[in-house]
Amino acid sequence: MMLKKTLLGLSLLLPALLVQAHEYTAGELHIEHPWSREMPAVAPTAAAYFVVHNKGSEADRLLSASTPVAGKAELHEHIHADGLMKMQQVQNVAIPAGGEVKFEPMGYHVMLFNLKQQAKDGERFPLTLTFEKAGTVEVEIAVHKDAPEGSTHGEGQHQH
C-alpha cells in the first residue's frame, strides 16, 4: 500500500518537475515552456510558442529568432482585418516591464519556414531568441501532437 502511494505521489510530481525543467532565463526575462505542434511530414512550415515574463523594471523587445532546423524564422502575429483573421510578420515584439507576452496559436508566434524536416511528437529542437536588452538565449522547443494543457488557444492550423 505504501509503495502504491509513493508511486502515485511520484507520478503526480513528475509532470511538475518536467515543466520546471523546460523554462529559461535571459537577464530579467523568464521564458516558459517553448513548444510546437507536430505537423504533417509534408507541411512546409511550423510555428513555435512560449510565454515571456519580464520581471524587470524596464521593457525589452524580442528582435529575432533563428533555428538550424529551418531556413528562416520570423516573428508573426494574427490580426483581425475586415472581419478576417490573417497573419503578418512583425519586426519585433515589446515585452513590457513587469508584464508578459504570450506567443500562442492565434496570437504572436515564431513562424518557421523551409524546414529541413518536420519534428515529431516528443522530439525537441533548438531555437535562439535575440532580445534587445537581455541578449540571446537558446531554448529547446518541445514538439507535441496537440497543444499542451494550459495553452489558451486552439487547434486551428496556420495558413500563410
Image: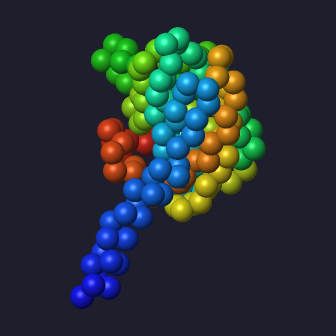
Asked if residue 36 is positioned above or below residue 131 in the image, the reply reads: below
Q: Quadrant of the N terminus?
A: bottom left
Q: Is residue 31 left or right of residue 63?
A: left
Q: From this viewpoint, which residue is outermost toward the front?
A: 2
Q: Is residue 73 left or right of residue 159?
A: right
Asked if residue 43 is positioned above or below residue 104 in the image, the reply reads: below
The residue lying toward the viewer, choosing from 12 and 106, is 12
Horizontal and vertical percent for residue 119? Answer: 61, 56
Is there any visible trace of residue 94 in the rendered image? no
Is there any visible trace of residue 119 in the rendered image? yes
Quadrant in the rendering for residue 83: top left
The residue lying toward the viewer, choosing from 47 and 26, is 26
Instruction: Kindly identify the residue that appears in the image at 32 percent across and 38 percent down.
Output: 152
Horizontal and vertical percent for residue 80? Answer: 36, 18
Instruction: Kindly identify the residue that appears in the image at 45 percent across and 57 percent down.
Output: 17
- Colouring used for the render: rainbow
Instruction: Kindly identify the residue that appears in the image at 48 percent across and 39 percent down.
Output: 32
Horizontal and vertical percent for residue 55? Answer: 47, 23
Instruction: Kindly identify the residue that appears in the image at 39 percent across and 31 percent down.
Output: 106
Q: Is residue 6 left or right of residue 51?
A: left
Horizontal and vertical percent for residue 6? Answer: 33, 77
Q: Is residue 128 left or right of residue 45?
A: right
Q: From this viewpoint, which residue is outermost toward the left?
A: 1
Give the tally of numbered discs: 0
Quadrant in the rendering for residue 67: top right
The residue lying toward the viewer, choosing from 60 and 38, is 60
Q: From this viewpoint, which residue is outermost toward the bottom?
A: 1
